[in-house]
Image (tube, rainbow, N blue to C red):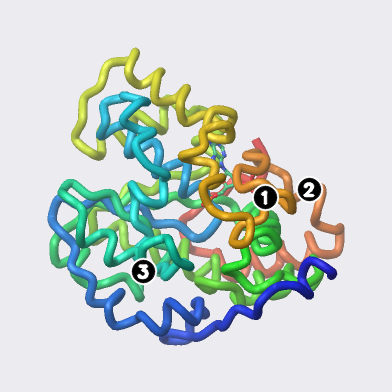
Amino acid sequence: MAQEAQRIPVAMGHIEGVPLLGSTCDAWDSIYNFQARGDDILIATFPKSGTTWMQEIVDLILQEGDAQKGRRAPTYIKVPFIDLVPPKPRPIGVELAQTMKSPRVLKTHLPINLLPPSFWEKNVKAVYVARNAKDCMVSYYYFHKMNKMLPPPGTWENYFSAFLSGDVPWGSWFDHVIGWGKAMDKHQILFIFYEDMIEDPMREIRKVMKFLGKDLSDEVLENIKYHTSFQAMKENPMTNNSTISNAVMDQTISPFIRKGTVGDWKTHFSVAQNIIFDEEYKKKMEGSGLNFRTEL
Ligand code: A3P
């Protein structure tokens, strides 16, 4: 509580009923009217689904496995987050993207119905990473604790209910994964599961490479796997967000690259919460065609 009491309140807003950070809502016109380019690569996720991991994988594929080039700048500079207006001195996502040469790699957490239309007008390729909701919830809870750009999470019990009802920044996990999953019929979207990446990173890195139309040797792919491993990214100052001030992300509360496992929810969910969650999950996900694994 003491840590939470010191925090400056974070304003929230809504766009078409989806809870978003107030700063994102204030900049909504420039975000929604963002001009994509045909050779952009979009990485889309619900928060805490392995976005940073995929950002690094895609960047290293484009850099043909050259880890030195990968370290040219922090992830959040190499891959602008178009729906974020971060505290200074970090540049605003859409503005940073506009200054970049093609091919750009861009990040979004927006649900499909709020994505700037120019992405589909330009037929942009998107990699969507999805992570099972239980682990996502736990990861997001710790992220709320350490990231002062987000409202404090309150107690775990409160956060559990908020997440389940979609009352967290970027809204409902269910709507997000279902919306992006359905969009695969119409658009160039590669749907990747975080759990599959944990299970067999080489297999998933290869999928991404093929989707991006690249052909890299096994040796290069091994190198990409090595440099994007949990441990390597945890130690790399360009990927672990240690370049962001403690006043914004306090990694003494919880590290940004935290655990990187499947099944951490088991040490957080009570038996009763698990029953409530499973009932809700069944109702919401029936017929979605998406099969998430909550353990490996
Ligand atoms: P945990 O909090 O469960 O550890 P995002 O980048 O979307 O914010 O996702 C963050 C989650 O991905 C965190 O999960 C983080 O530890 C995990 N992560 C980051 N890099 C990873 C990697 N190289 N391998 C596995 N998990 C990784």
> CA–CA distance between discs 2 and 1?
23 Å
Labels 2 and 1 touching (C-beta < 8 A): no
Question: Left of 75 or right of it: where is 277?
Answer: right
Q: Residue 236: give x, y in percent of width and height.
A: 52, 33
Q: Residue 144: give x, y in percent of width and height.
A: 66, 64
Q: Residue 217: give x, y in percent of width and height.
A: 27, 16
Count all numbered tags in the image, as a single digit.
Answer: 3
Residue at left 39%, top 56%? 44
| Residue 40 visible in the snapshot | yes
Q: Which mark is residue 140?
A: none
Q: Which is in the foreground here, disc 3 or disc 1?
A: 1
Q: Residue 233: give x, y in percent of width and height.
A: 53, 34
Q: Which mark is residue 251?
A: 1
267 shown above or below 150? above
80 shown above or below 70? below
Disc 2: which residue: 266
- Name the quadrant where ligand 1 sits: top right
Is label 1's Cβ within 8 Å of ligand 1? no
233 or 15, nearer to the observer: 233
Q: Quadrant of residue 15?
A: bottom left
- N-terminal of the pair, mark 2 or mark 3, is 3
SS for callout 1: loop
> CA–CA distance between discs 2 and 3?
30 Å
Disc 3: which residue: 112
| Residue 134 visible in the snapshot | no
Disc 3 marks a residue whose amino acid type is: Ile
Question: Left of 129 or right of it: where is 242?
Answer: right
Residue at left 32%, top 18%? 220
Disc 1 marks a residue whose amino acid type is: Gln
Category of crowding for the residue at label 3, using alpha-carbon neighbours closer than 10 angstroms: few (below 14), some (14–19), many (at least 20): some
